[in-house]
Image: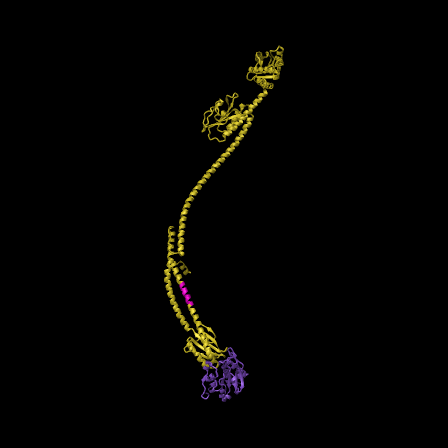
Amino acid sequence: MACNERLLAAALLLAVLLPTPAAPQGLPPLSEYEVKAGFLYNFAGLIAWPDGTPPALSLCIVGDDPFGAAKAAIDGKTIGDKSLTVRTAVPSTGLDDCQIVFLASSQNERVPAIVKDLRGSPVLTVGDRAGLAAQGLIVGFYREGDKVRFEINVDAARRAGLPISSRLLNLARIVHDAEAAR
Amino acid sequence: MSVLASFRHAPIGRKLLAIGLITTAVTLFVLSLVLIGRGALEWRSRTISDLETYAAMIGANAAPAVMFDDAAAATDTLSALAAKPSIVYGAIHDARGRQFAVYRPAGTAGRVDPSRVLQGDSFSARSITLARPILFKGKQLGTLYLQSDLDEMYGKLARDAGLILLSALIAFGAGTVLLLRLQKTIVEPIQGLAGAMQGVSGRRNYAVRVPVVSRDEVGVLSQAFNTMLEHIQSRDAELAVNRDRLEGEVARRTAELEQANARLELELLERKRAEAALQRSSQQIDLLSQMAATLQTCLAQEEVGGVVGPFIARLFPASSGVIALMKSSRNMVEVSAGWGPAPPTGQVFAPNDCWAIRRGQLHVSGLGLTTPRCAHAPAQDGIQACAPLMAQGEMLGILHAQSPDTAAPPDQNALLQRVAGEVAQALANLRYRDALKRMAIRDPLTGLFNRRYLEEYLEMEIVRSSRKGVPLGVVLVDIDHFKQFNDSFGHEAGDEVLVEVGQLFMRHIRDGDAACRYGGEEFVLAMWECPLEVARERAERLRQDVKKLQIRIGQRPLGGVTLSAGVAVFPDHGSTAEAVLRAADRALYTAKVAGRDHVAVAAIPSAG
């Protein structure tokens, strides 16, 4: 039960399912990964995907899956003319057929290799810790108080050929490649 | 009501001014309302449009902030509304309805319309509020609320109203001046017309004309007024003429009526006259028929005048006249009878003295006539008429009438002729009867009375003689040997003897005596108041005279004729005619026996 209610709340936050704002008050706040799942979904909508991108976007979760049931709220949902499919336990290699790659914390050590692997591929790479964007990932989550925020490496985005909406940029902390990553 | 009433009686100029000003005021008022209302509507739609624009912009910009739960970024986005001072409130609510970000510029706390901020689209006198969904790829992320107050609009509208009021005052003033100027073109002609009308109705001067200064309704009115005046003038003249004509007509009709009355009276008079004439005519017819009936009873022509006189006197009142009869000698006309108040005198006149006899037709003379007056009539005033009495072409006499009345009815002549005709017819009838009678009592051969007459005569004379106590002598005569005459000389000779003897007898008798052929060659002389001796003497003288007769047949003389006579006398020889005649016959027998050519007296019968 409790699990279902939370999922529902996440869906509300994402404004995906419910058309009216007349929602019952006093729902408990969303969990961190429910928020992050929603963010990933929103990223998919704010990226101008290049031509040739399949309509079914693959969100590949690499490493230990931290979302659990939270990912069900976004799996199979449409976003504009695209739809989103969540894939878990994806090996860290051969990720270029994914459109969005979420690197779980367990994969933080492998970030440089994966960045190197996907260099030039139009894949939105997302890390789950501050500073990972500077290592070459395009987006990196971080916490600011109880809020989930994100960094965007505009260099990495340019390398990947994925234009980031300025409105997204307005919300993000803009970072550049660290020296080591260059 | 009283305002309307006083307006109704106000002068036209003031009315026109009031109408113009009221119209202008209403127009300006309506125009102001329209302008202000339109300004308000425009302002509202522009405000709505502005709000829409801002909502679209803010909504698009704020969508990611909502997506990524970034309230600060959303608040930052809302702060762009500061560019529009009239927007006093802005808020973003998330999908769950919770306020996510809010915009409340400083110093606008009193200007927000809090009851309406979250009401969706709403408009009030104070504010315009808009609620717009924040969308991302077709999905609603939240709602954006914007509210604009209308202070700026009211300020602008107040400025506009002031401007309009100013314009209205200017227009009003200009309109007043213009109206005052223009109304004169209407009012002055009307005043002129009204003045002229008052002049016409007051002084009845229909010769007045109104000057026509325009071609509008007033001009038409003036023209029509002038035309009407002309009509009235001509109608007046016509009326006067008609009145005169009517009076003339009345006079003429009255005269005609009087004439008709007079004619009617005349006709009435004529009718009365005709009735009188008819009555008179019927009276005349009655009288005439009575007269004719009376005339039938006349026995002798001498009676006619006396019978007719009274009728004529009634048929011709106030007239007088005579009936004069032609004598059988035809050389003398003798007055037979007369009538009337002054019967003409003069008993006998010559036929030529009467123009009616001469001309054989009615002759009228007298007053005013050129015809000659008859000499037989006495000279007298008035009218005279002679009607000839003619029957079967024979002039029997005249009917003479005269009247002092000159105005005798016109049918008098015809009536007179008719009376004359009746009288003449009666006279003719009597003459005819006389002739018939004569033929019945005479012996046609000798002209002596016949035996029948003798018997009547004797009967009548015996009555008269016995009444008077005088004798009546009777002589019975027989021609001697008359049979021998007939045998010797023929019947012609016998007849000649009878005629000659008869004429001798006629010469011997007196008036009143009767000489009769008693039968064959027997004659009787009856002599009134004649004693026996006288009778015997006369018989003797007769016997002697007969002997002296020289009777001839052609050149041959007949022999001497003798007669025998017997004399008897009434009452000596009998009391009846038969007795006396018988006595005379016996005496004649005695004379015959005594040798003929002898007179014998009857013997006096012995008493008893």
- Quick one: quadrant of the C terminus of chain B? top right
Indicate yes or no whether the magenta region holds residue B100: no
B96 and B2: which is toward the camera = B96
Residue at 42% from the left image edge and 70% from the top image edge: B39
Q: Is residue B388 above or below residue A88?
A: above
Residue B113 appearing in the image: no
Picture coordinates of residue B240 (x, y %)? 40, 46
Q: Which chain is yellow?
A: B
Picture coordinates of residue B571 (x, y %)? 59, 15
- Quick one: quadrant of the N terminus of chain B? bottom left
- Counting labels gives 0
Q: Which residues are magenta?
A: B23-34
Picture coordinates of residue B552 (x, y %)? 58, 13
Q: Colour of chain A?
A: purple
B370 and B50: which is toward the camera = B50
Main secondary structure along the magenta-highlighted residues: helix
Tell me the quarter of the picture where residue B564 sits: top right
Indicate yes or no whether the magenta region holds residue B24: yes
Picture coordinates of residue B434 (x, y %)? 56, 22
Residue B158 appearing in the image: yes
Q: Is residue B194 above or below residue B265?
A: below
A37 and B69: which is toward the camera = A37
Coloring scheme used? by chain
Residue at 36% from the left image edge and 62% from the top image edge: B177
